[in-house]
Image (cartoon, rainbow, N blue to C red):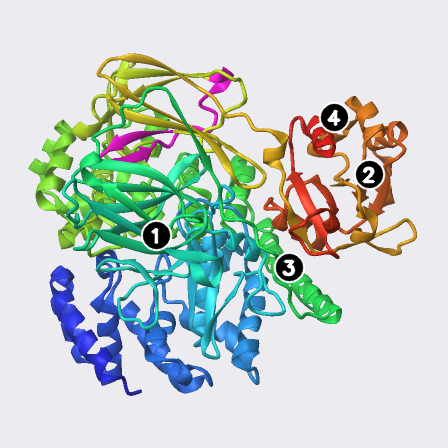
């Protein structure tokens, strides 16, 4: 294929700039490029020209060649690839990286599994078909933050949304369809984030839910949610692009703004001046959304020579934090009413001096009327059956693995434990079984099981026997006198942070001279001193969510701050010193054991070494506070608050003692209402060295009227006792209705039924109607449900299969669809001036276990 002079000049210039990053690999890369054909060489140079340092270090030339080879094949062997503009082809078909996943040679594997299904299909039909294939092979399941590779997702058949979308983008790129992951770092209206997929199809970008096939494009459960977003973006690992709105770019990653496709938005300007009205250049501008009770940066910009930074952003409340030279100013802004804010940098402070509580009201973008799609009932039924087939195909695939595991003759008294591990490993069970079968005796087998128990569940799915063997064989000669938990978790364990597990111990043992290792063992702080003196920290040539492996950091002599911390732990563990990265503050620590009374982890970095103050936190209004749900605490560092990672239940009994270093802190409590807005209490305070300080905190109260909303719901169907179809809009009419999808016998449903029994008189006399929705009439055999029917005979009963209606209504009311019972309070749209007729108006909804819901429903009906 011929490439334009523009892109040729770009690649030539950028590749020459990148050569100095190649380190010891430079000579090998240049030699192998000389053996390539002209187009192969051009495309590999394109990949290397803006490649993150960690990818240059962690992966070999041959892997990138495989991606280039497949991309060239697609250009000549798919009907759509030849029509793709070169910038889109380079970024979204050729490019190997999608997110922060481990890179493997997978494109041809996916192509061979998928492409035969696309014969005689146009590009639009092919996209839909690929997503059906994805649903046959993977579904949603919450997992940890480390992103599994597409091949790992294929093996285990599940992933969180970031993994599903990476998997689906890989499937699409493997057959020559340009695709990218779209991401909202945090929702504005609820505590979560989400990722989905865009495809370049027939000349424009369209979207779809990853592994969630629909009969048309530009449709997904998240459509209404995305319309309330403040920031939606995608990433390109290049800065060669056309017609894109750029949020930011560094030498490895370009962040592209995609908000305007999904939500009402505007360009918002931040101007930073000094007291003489002169512009301030290179001030950091952080746009932060309150989510999980912490302010999270969703975009970080720098002011230009005019003191300006700007971003196309959704219409709601956002915190803007401007930082310069460690001093900061933070203001809440409603972008719905403002288009610009001016900061005087001379008003910036080292810390906040306000004593007491500051109350903040955060309002997300408003809900928009849901989109309608021209889909016939026949097409809906066909799509439903197709989706059911996807579920069956995936279950059959998984059942074959389970059957194979059940046929294995297990290993003695550890049968049950081993079976559970293998079932977690799923498609990777043969690697784990091989590792277990390498034992020489019962004691060795127990060590291998104990090692596996130190790993995450996700590690079971992608760990290799050879690497695990290398780690367990490295223990000879180590001090075995450490407590077992310390020894296995912090010496033997290969998992350090969120990095890819690698075979680093033997390399490290051989890398350092004996006298250096002796010095490290004598004083582990010397390990960090060595790293600081010999490893250059890379700030701008990497992607912060990628980590160069310990061996490669030593070989190439460069790495990001997290990669350097991982290396510290790796060196310590390789020479028998227990060490870890503390998850609460990301400090590095080693374990020191003097005797039973003097032992524990010691922080290495001076910045974290003075944890000798106490903060007593009192929850004064007694409403339960759960960390990272409705409260957090953060330490101020260089103008930015860094949230601590603490246990969810750190405030048992409404009081907690927390050990902290001296410094300036912020506590946020957040009461998120069903309409998505948040009532916030903000507390800022100083903790002095060796001080004990008491802080009273609480959640802000809300009124019933604050909790209600008008969400337009599509009409839906239920069935009566005679199996006749009943339109919900005909049931609701002009009165408020409480509709509850009952999951009889389950604790959350039992709880709400008992609360209804306690308030039976109020429910009998309610100014509205109560509708119970059951799966079938056998549900009425439940004793508690029978009691409710006896006490409150006005309750009406209808039936549903709890699939489409529960999912659609829960998503539309911004709830989790997999939690029952689902409670909906609604009326007819005629009661709302803002919503069209012939629909249902959702006033309030909740799902799952909710204490006090009976009392709340009575109050809502009376409102």
Contact between labelled residues 3 and 2, with CB atoms less than 8 Å apart = no
Left/right of residue 150 with respect to residue 15 in the rendered view: right
- Indicate yes or no whether the magenta region holds residue 849: no
Q: Residues within 10 Å of mark 1 (few under 14, many from 20)?
A: few
Mark 1 against mark 3, which lies toward the viewer? 3
- Residue placed under numbered mark 3 in the picture: 391
Where 207 falls versus 85 (above or below)? above
Q: Nearer the viewer, residue 127 or 428?
A: 127
Mark 2 against mark 4, which lies toward the viewer? 2
- Residue placed under numbered mark 1 in the picture: 466
Q: Which mark sits nearer the N-terminus, 3 or 4?
A: 3
User: Do we see residue 802 in this rendering?
Assistant: no
Left/right of residue 655 with respect to residue 838 in the rendered view: left
Q: Nearer the viewer, residue 512 or 735?
A: 735
Magenta range is 633-654
Residue 552 position, x and y percent, is: 20, 53
Q: Which mark sits nearer the N-terminus, 1 or 4?
A: 1
Mark 2 against mark 3, which lies toward the viewer? 2
- Residue placed under numbered mark 2 in the picture: 769
Q: Which mark sits nearer the N-terminus, 1 or 2?
A: 1
Mark 1 against mark 2, which lies toward the viewer? 2
């Amino acid at each position: 294929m011929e490439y334009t002079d523009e892109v040729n000049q770009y690649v030539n210039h950028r590749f020459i700039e990148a050569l100095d990053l190649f380190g010891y690999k430079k000579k090998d890369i240049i030699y192998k490029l000389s053996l390539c054909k002209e187009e192969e060489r051009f495309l590999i140079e394109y990949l290397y020209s803006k490649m993150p340092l960690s990818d240059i270090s962690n992966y070999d030339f041959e892997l990138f060649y495989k991606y280039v080879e497949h991309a060239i094949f697609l250009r000549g062997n798919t009907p759509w690839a030849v029509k793709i503009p070169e910038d889109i082809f380079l970024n979204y078909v050729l490019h190997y990286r999608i997110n922060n996943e481990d890179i493997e040679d997978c494109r041809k594997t996916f192509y061979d599994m998928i492409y035969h299904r696309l014969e005689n299909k146009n590009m639009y039909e092919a996209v839909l078909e690929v997503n059906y294939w994805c649903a046959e092979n993977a579904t949603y399941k919450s997992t940890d933050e480390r992103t599994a590779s597409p091949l790992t997702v294929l093996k285990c058949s599940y992933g969180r949304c970031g993994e599903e979308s990476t998997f689906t983008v890989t499937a699409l790129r493997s057959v020559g369809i340009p695709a990218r992951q779209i991401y909202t770092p945090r929702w504005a209206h609820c505590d979560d984030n989400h990722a989905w997929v865009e495809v370049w199809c027939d000349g424009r970008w369209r979207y779809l839910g990853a592994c969630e096939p629909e009969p048309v494009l530009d449709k997904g459960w998240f459509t209404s949610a995305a319309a309330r977003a403040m920031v939606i973006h995608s990433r390109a690992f290049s800065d060669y692009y056309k017609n894109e709105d750029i949020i930011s770019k560094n030498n490895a990653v370009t962040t592209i703004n995609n908000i305007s496709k999904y939500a009402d938005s505007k360009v918002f300007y931040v101007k930073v001046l000094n007291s003489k009205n002169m512009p301030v250049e290179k001030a950091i501008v952080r746009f932060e959304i309150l989510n999980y009770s912490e302010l999270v940066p969703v975009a970080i910009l720098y002011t230009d020579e005019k003191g300006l930074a700007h971003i196309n952003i959704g219409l709601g409340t956002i915190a803007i934090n401007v930082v310069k030279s460690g001093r900061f100013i933070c203001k809440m802004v409603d972008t719905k009413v403002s288009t610009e804010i001016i900061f005087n940098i001379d008003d910036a402070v080292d810390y906040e001096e306000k004593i007491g509580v500051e109350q903040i009201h955060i309002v997300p973008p408003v809900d928009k009327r849901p989109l309608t799609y021209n889909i016939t009932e026949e097409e809906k039924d066909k799509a439903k059956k197709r989706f059911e087939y996807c579920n069956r195909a995936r279950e059959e695939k998984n059942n074959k693995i389970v059957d194979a595991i059940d046929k294995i003759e297990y290993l003695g008294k550890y049968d049950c434990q081993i079976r559970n591990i293998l079932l977690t490993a799923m498609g990777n069970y043969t690697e784990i079984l091989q590792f277990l079968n390498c034992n020489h005796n019962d004691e060795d087998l127990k060590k291998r099981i104990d090692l596996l128990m130190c790993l995450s569940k996700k590690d079971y799915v992608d760990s290799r026997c050879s690497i695990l063997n290398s780690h367990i064989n490295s223990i000879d000669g180590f001090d075995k006198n450490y407590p077992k938990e310390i020894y296995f978790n912090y010496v033997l364990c290969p998992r350090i942070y969120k990095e890819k597990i690698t075979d680093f111990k033997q390399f490290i043992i051989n890398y350092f001279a004996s006298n250096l290792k002796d010095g490290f063992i004598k004083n582990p702080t010397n390990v960090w001193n060595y790293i600081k003196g010999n490893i250059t920290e890379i700030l701008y040539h990497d992607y912060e969510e990628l980590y160069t492996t310990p061996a490669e950091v030593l070989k190439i002599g460069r790495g990001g701050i997290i990669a350097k911390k991982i290396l510290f732990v790796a060196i310590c563990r390789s020479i028998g010193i227990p060490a870890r990265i503390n998850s609460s503050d990301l400090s590095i620590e080693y374990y020191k054991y003097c005797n039973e009374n003097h032992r524990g982890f010691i922080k290495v970095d001076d910045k974290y070494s003075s944890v000798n103050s106490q903060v007593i936190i009192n929850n004064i209004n007694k409403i339960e506070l759960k960390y990272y749900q409705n409260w957090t605490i953060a330490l101020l560092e260089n103008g930015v608050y860094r949230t601590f990672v603490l246990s969810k239940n750190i405030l048992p009994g409404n009081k907690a003692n927390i050990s902290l270093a001296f410094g300036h802190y912020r506590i946020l409590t957040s009461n998120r209402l069903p309409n998505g807005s948040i009532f916030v209490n903000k507390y800022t305070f100083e903790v002095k060295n060796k001080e004990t300080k008491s802080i009273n905190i609480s959640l802000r109260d809300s009124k019933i009227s604050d909790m209600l909303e008008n969400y337009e719901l599509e009409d839906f169907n239920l069935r009566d006792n005679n199996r006749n179809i009943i339109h919900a809009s005909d049931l609701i009419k002009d009165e408020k209705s409480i509709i509850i999808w009952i999951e009889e016998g389950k604790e959350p449903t039992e709880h709400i039924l008992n609360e209804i029994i306690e308030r039976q008189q109020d429910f009998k006399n309610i100014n509205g109607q109560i509708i119970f929705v059951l799966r079938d009439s056998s549900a009425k055999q439940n004793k508690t449900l029978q009691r409710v029917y006896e006490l409150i005979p006005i309750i009406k009963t209808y039936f549903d299969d709890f699939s489409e209606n529960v999912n659609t209504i829960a998503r539309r009311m911004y709830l989790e669809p997999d939690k029952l019972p689902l409670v909906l309070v609604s009326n007819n749209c005629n009661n709302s001036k803002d919503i069209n007729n012939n629909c249902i108006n959702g006033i309030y909804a909740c799902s799952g276990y909710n204490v006090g819901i009976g009392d709340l429903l009575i109050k809502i009906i009376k409102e």
